[in-house]
Amino acid sequence: MRRASIFAILLASFTGALGAFAQTPQPVFIQNATILTVTHGNIEHGSILVRDGKIAAVGTNLKAPDGATLIDATGQFIVPGIIDCHSHIAIDGNVNEGAPAVSSMVKISDVLNPEDKHMYIDLAGGVTTANILHGSANPIGGQTVVIKLRWGKLPSALPFEGALPGIKFALGENPKHSNFGPPPGMPQRYPATRLGVEEVIRQAFTEAREYKKTWDDYDRRRTSGERDLIPPRRDEKLEPLVEVLEGRRYVHAHCYRADEILMLIRVANEFGFKVRTFQHVLEGYKVADEIAASGAGGSTFSDWWAYKMEAYDAIPYNAALMQERGVVTSINSDNPDEARHLNQEAAKTMKYGGVSPNDALKLITLNPAIQLGIENRVGSIDVGKDADLVFYNHDPLSVYAVVQKTLIDGEVYFDRATDLARRPELEKEKQSLLDKEKKAGEEEKGEEKAEKKSEKKSEKKPDKHKPPESGDSVEIIERGVR
Amino acid sequence: MNGTPFADSAVVKRLLAQIVLPLLIANFLLPLSAQAQRTATVYAIKGGKIHTLAGPAIDNATVIMREGKIAAVGVNVEIPLGAQVIDATGLDVYPGLFDPVTQVGLAEVGAVSATVDVAELGDINPELVAATAVNPASEHIPVTRASGITHVIAVPGAPGFEVQAGGLISGRASAFSLSGWTFDEMQISPSVAMVVNWPIIRTRTFDFATFGYKEKPFQEAKKEYDKSVNELGDWLDRARHYAQAKEKGSPALYERDLKLESLVPVVKGTMPLLVIAAQARDIRNAVEFCTKQNVKMILADGSQAWKVKDLLKEKNIPVILGPTERVPDEEDDPYDKPMSQPAELHAAGIQIAFSSFGFSFSRRLSQFAGTAVAYGLPHDEALKAVTINAAEMFGLGDQLGTIEPGKIANLIVTTGDPLEIRTDVRYLFIRGELTSIDNRHRALYEEYRKRSEQAH
């Protein structure tokens, strides 16, 4: 608790400092950079003009407009902001609502926490946009949201404007609870097999289709002028599934094995919806043609394997092979440790599968943008797109590359030089807060001692750590007031 | 009359020389020669840049390997007649990489307990040895090897991403090369360290009954912690008495105790304690404990080693660091602390090594080291931290870690800097034998590529 409060203070002062720099109304002019545009090659000694948070110009023969804030990027490499298609950061509380097999009624957007320190850590790894998902406890999980990592802003400022919402599905060992039992005292929950996982999804969409029909009928009758109609009862579980059926919500399906991937493609075909992305999809390489034909993307890990049975056939060539077969492929983090170095994870596909440097970079920029339907806004360095930019001191596909700056909408959200420069000051501030806390603790102890002396007669000393019994409560409350 | 015919010493000598000795020798040599047949090939790698790590890199040099050992290195080395020659022109030669804290061989699939032999029940298990359960047929061995890692240490009870930590004394760690039909063929040393999971003052534990955290008063948690530390001390004291009884007393006066017997090399100072500890407070206490007990300590994990670097330097404690690309331990630690800590420890004069603390992630070893270079660790030190440093920590420095004559010929031929992500391993030698870099992943890739080709 104490640590958290100190951090909050540090955070507040830090974002304040960045904000002052960020809110300059002038255009920003970045010069002397090696720009990896992803869509139209690499530009040596290039410049980028940022106006109103958008990329206004990119090229070699640009001139800084009057009054522009200049950023010299000599020796640096600029890439589009990294997009993490599978993340659990910025969530306040539990990631899983594990009780029902279908938990489509719960929403990540209800629990966004813009002060999560993992956002800052991800920014320091060059991540600017992330798809925030629930866990994989349910065949049909909760509603996902795409965010920009506008760390320290209000929760309402996080969602990526206009990005289609999503829903998490999960297949295989996790929804069938293979590797962990229910908490003690809780019953085993259906499903416990991959067969059951399919049935849960088919059942839910059967209900959703009926539900949609009921509403469609009602709407038709109402618009044709019928009066005194009773509207159907709303169902928050089925509504997001109707949105899926109507193509207004993306399905992001956690999966591992080839058979379960094919299962979901079959079910989706049956009900007439599309799977937007297969997540993890570690056996995607086995059915890459089927995935490509279904139009789904594949968002995978670089080289994770063997942590569970369904990951035993995982190979580091997965991304390369899926991409080769025409699947729009991305590499995601699933955790903040991994999100710190997605550039390195993408680089591994050059070694495992011979992917070209530009295609490797696409795995963490343009491709996840396409998967999330936001490629008109982000994913490459092109005029008109958001100025979400990452500065590296080396080729970003090298292990030696370190992020120097991360910009979102032209605002600097991470700056390594500033971070380094502020450390002594933060250390001092932290120490003074700790000293203050320590002093307060000592004073409290002194008071306690005095209290104990005056209460020598009392046999039973109150135990500070024990929950108060009814007899103690008055004293505790009084102490609290003091 | 009363002597036997063999009482004549001349007869005995002749007999020994002519019949018994040759027989004995032949008998003794049999398994060796069978082994020698496999390693009979003399290999020469020529034309490459040899990074011996014992001195400056040598351009266009040759390394000769014979009978499992490095026989010669240098520019003017003559290639013996009949040697198998590997042309490494344009390539680089490095010592094989060494991952010193792993569960490689002890675990196959993290979540499938039937395939995991890492953490035994109980708190005091010094008599256990990882070598017992190292599976030479594990798919992890060739996969790990393909990333240039030629030898590892399997550590019983080592915590990791995929497995639970073991008890207080989890057993003995075993060093082995990543190739061989049996552990006996693979082994470098079956008992290189005694593993201690340093206790933690745990005031907060996860409670499965409520699916929430349970708080415990500090004093109570501290009491449990002290009890564990005292227990550890007691065992070492008892091992000391046991050693004395064994040396000085009659065998009739003591009962054989397998646990104490296993701890004797620790109290004699011939086997280090591999102490797994992360928090500054725990590291400090562990160092004080080992100093007081006069036992050799290697610190493993050391997430907050930077907070106690002066003490570590003063007591000359080497540190084996876990993955560098983690989120910092403490909320208000600098964001890059796990990446910059290796440079900080090195600058403080502390010997460091990198390790994966895993099995399926062992192949990321060079990535962890490369990232530390990005955040300030000198490149040559990072190379040492994945080769010779850990070898020295475990007393294997005269056998491994550099390309020098007499050392075990575990080395790699690469397309460049082995810490860089896109670098490939072209050839790999284990005990002087050219060893395959094929593996399960490569095989699956090729198999399923064919499937796609057939479809078209």
Image: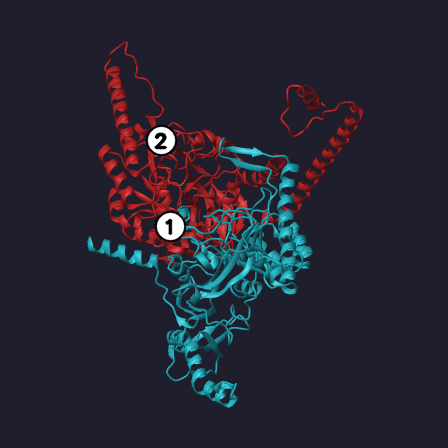
Residue A295, position as x, y percentages in the image:
27, 42
Please tell me which of labels 1 and 2 falls first in the chain: 2
Left or right, residue B220 beside residue A397: right
Q: Colour of chain B?
A: cyan
Asked whether the viewer can see residue B296, the reply is: no
From the viewer's side, name the closer residue of A414 and B290.
Answer: B290
Image quadrant occupied by the C terminus of chain B: bottom left
Tell me the residue at 45%/29% (across/down): A110
User: For mark 1, what is the residue?
Assistant: A362
Characterize the local packing of mark 2: few (<14), some (14-19) or many (20 or more) Cα atoms within 10 angstroms: many
Asked whether the viewer can see residue A212, the reply is: yes
Identify the mark at residue A101; answer none if there is no mark. Answer: 2
Identify the mark at residue B108; answer none if there is no mark. Answer: none
Cα distance in 3D space between marks 1 and 2: 35 Å
| Residue type at tag 2 | Ala
Q: Colour of chain A?
A: red
